[in-house]
């Protein structure tokens, strides 16, 4: 048996002098173990020593600088083929090469239908082996693509360390794990722990074997409620992707995660965009944020100090669809449909999601706050009905209209009911409402406040008299606290906007 402590001591010394070479270290170890044994030991000890393995087979100290936004930006067009092969290998092992046909194909399609129904009616979901394979077939592409878009909100302020410890609660079949591995550069070091009590962990394990050499993984096969989240922490990043709606007490789990985070760590919660899971995520966020809890880093920023939103909270972002993977296409083509049924029941490549990023250190994506004066507060919107007002808001949706006037959900963190900005007449001075990305902060000048009886929501009517400016977004990190004393600076922001907003 190799003297692991001797290997660690030599590696800790050499990493400050030159690349750590297994062939050199074996010379210093009693019994002169084979270099391959030393190399494997270094791989296993790398997270504790802070080493990354190179293409040459040597080890270097991981850099101290945080990672930046990926270049090019994270925007996958398809699930990588290597991951498709892993999943298909699992299907072939379970059902043979014709897994998508006959009885096995019917079994998998029925599993997917059952999952859809259970999600829709909020039933408890039992993940046996068949259900886990069905979940992977239907959800893996989107569950892989989504986390990278969310993590990008943290890299914009360089808040993800190059040596990352991450706890993935409810890791499922592995979409978030694969996203973290691909999102992170090759010279970074990731210590990844998954909590997954269901048979999905077996599929997850196969995917983790396909991750990079500097992605070190451990699976905990018990419910999160039975885990001591501090044991292997503290954590730089805690992921809760598509799991909060399946927990009995999601708020209790989020509170336990708070204590397991590093003081400068982040908790990322993701949910499908449908009404129940999206609003459930937002309710959990609101229950644990504020006084003595988390700060909401993004996207539903609190622009008024001391207030929490109380509206329905249904907000989600949308990204470009992915290419249909071959395994979905084959499963769908073999479905037995009625004469009027359309294809596509077993295809799922939409990337639509709700998310919340929570932190312990009061960091927010944009350091913008509102102050009383010429800025109206959404909580007091009833007192402004039929008036033209100025306000500050976060853009919380893409266009929600169905061919009519462009419609966007907005909020300032104080709202008690839903608010929608309706673009009735676009001009060069208000088109920021359409062109701004999800999560951007906008200023509204001279917008008309009305009540919508049918939707039981406020409509903010944007017409030719309204001016909208992009105050802060990831494109240009302006930080302008708005108050009566600096309100004239909006003219400067309007001039700057013309330089970096297309059209």
Image (cartoon, rainbow, N blue to C red):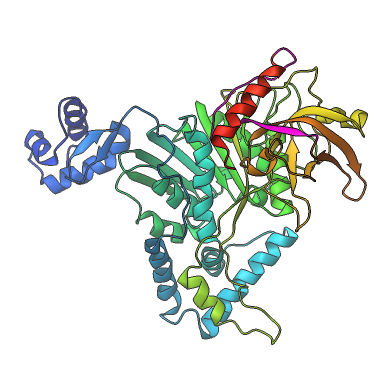
Q: Residue furthest top?
A: 485
Give the quarter of the image for residue 321.
bottom right
Residue at the spot x=54%, y=31% of the render?
476
Relative depth, front residue between 318 and 330: 318
Image position of 106 with respect to 123: above or below: below
Relative depth, front residue between 198 and 274: 274
**Which quadrant of the rendered structure holds the C terminus?**
top right
Image position of 403 with respect to 331: above or below: above
Image position of 356 with respect to 113: above or below: above
Residue 228 visible in this rendered orientation of the protein = no
**Residue 407 drawn at (x, y percent):** 76, 48
**Residue 30 drawn at (x, y percent):** 9, 36
- Queried whether the magenta region covers residue 483, the answer comes back as yes
Residue at the spot x=66%, y=65% of the render?
116
- Queried whether the magenta region covers residue 384, the answer comes back as no
Relative depth, front residue between 476 and 68: 476
Give the quarter of the image for residue 448.
top right
Q: How many marks?
A: 0
**Residue 148 drawn at (x, y percent):** 49, 46
Residue at the spot x=50%, y=40% of the render?
152
In the rendered view, does 377 fall on the left or right side of 315? right
Residue 210 visible in this rendered orientation of the protein = yes
**Residue 470 drawn at (x, y percent):** 64, 32
Residue at the spot x=54%, y=70% of the render?
130
Q: Which residues are magenta?
A: 465-485
**Which quadrant of the rendered structure holds the N terminus?**
top left
């Amino acid at each position: 048996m190799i003297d692991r402590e001797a290997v660690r001591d030599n590696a800790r010394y050499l990493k400050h002098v030159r690349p750590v070479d297994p062939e050199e270290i074996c010379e210093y170890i009693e019994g002169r173990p084979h270099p391959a044994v030393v190399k494997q030991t270094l791989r296993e000890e790398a997270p504790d020593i802070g080493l990354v393995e190179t293409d040459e087979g040597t080890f270097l100290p991981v850099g101290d600088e945080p990672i930046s936004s990926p270049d090019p930006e994270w925007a996958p067009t398809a699930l990588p083929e290597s991951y498709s092969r892993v999943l298909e290998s699992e299907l072939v092992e379970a059902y043979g090469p014709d897994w998508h046909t006959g009885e096995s194909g019917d079994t998998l399609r029925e599993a997917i239908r059952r999952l859809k129904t259970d999600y829709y009616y909020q039933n408890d979901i039992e993940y046996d082996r068949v259900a886990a394979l069905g979940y992977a077939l239907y959800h893996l592409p989107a569950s892989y693509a989504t986390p990278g878009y969310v993590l990008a909100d943290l890299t914009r302020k360089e808040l993800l360390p190059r040596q990352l410890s991450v706890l993935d609660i409810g890791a499922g079949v592995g979409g978030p794990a694969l996203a973290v591995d691909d999102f992170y550069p090759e010279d970074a070091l990731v210590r990844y722990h998954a909590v997954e009590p269901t048979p999905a962990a077996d599929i997850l394990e196969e995917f983790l074997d396909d991750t990079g050499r500097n992605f070190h993984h451990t699976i905990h096969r018990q419910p999160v409620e039975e885990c001591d989240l501090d044991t292997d922490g503290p954590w730089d990043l805690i992921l809760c992707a598509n799991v909060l709606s399946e927990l009995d007490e999601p708020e209790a789990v989020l509170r336990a995660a708070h204590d397991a985070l590093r003081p400068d760590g982040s908790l990322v919660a993701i949910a499908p965009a449908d009404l129940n899971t999206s609003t459930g995520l937002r309710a959990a966020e609101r229950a644990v944020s504020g006084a003595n809890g988390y700060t909401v880093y993004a996207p539903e920023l609190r622009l008024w100090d001391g207030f929490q939103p109380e509206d329905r909270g249904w907000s989600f972002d949308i990204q470009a669809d992915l290419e249909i993977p071959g395994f979905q296409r084959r499963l769908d083509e073999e479905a037995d449909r009625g004469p009027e049924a359309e294809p596509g029941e077993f295809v799922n490549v939409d990337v639509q999601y709700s998310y919340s990023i929570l932190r312990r250190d009061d960091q927010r994506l944009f350091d913008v706050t509102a102050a009383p004066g010429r800025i109206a507060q959404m909580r007091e919107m009833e007192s402004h009905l039929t008036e033209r007002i100025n306000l500050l808001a976060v853009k919380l949706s893409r266009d929600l209209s169905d061919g009519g006037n462009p419609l966007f959900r907005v909020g300032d963190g104080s709202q008690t009911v839903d608010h929608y900005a309706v673009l009735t007449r676009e001009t060069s001075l208000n088109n920021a409402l359409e062109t701004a990305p999800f999560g951007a902060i906008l200023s509204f000048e001279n917008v008309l406040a009305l009540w919508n009886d049918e939707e039981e929501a406020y409509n903010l009517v944007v017409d030719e008299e309204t001016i909208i400016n992009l105050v802060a977004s990831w494109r240009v990190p302006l930080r302008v606290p708005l108050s009566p004393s600096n309100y004239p600076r909006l003219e400067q922001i309007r001039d700057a906007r013309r330089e970096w907003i297309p059209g």
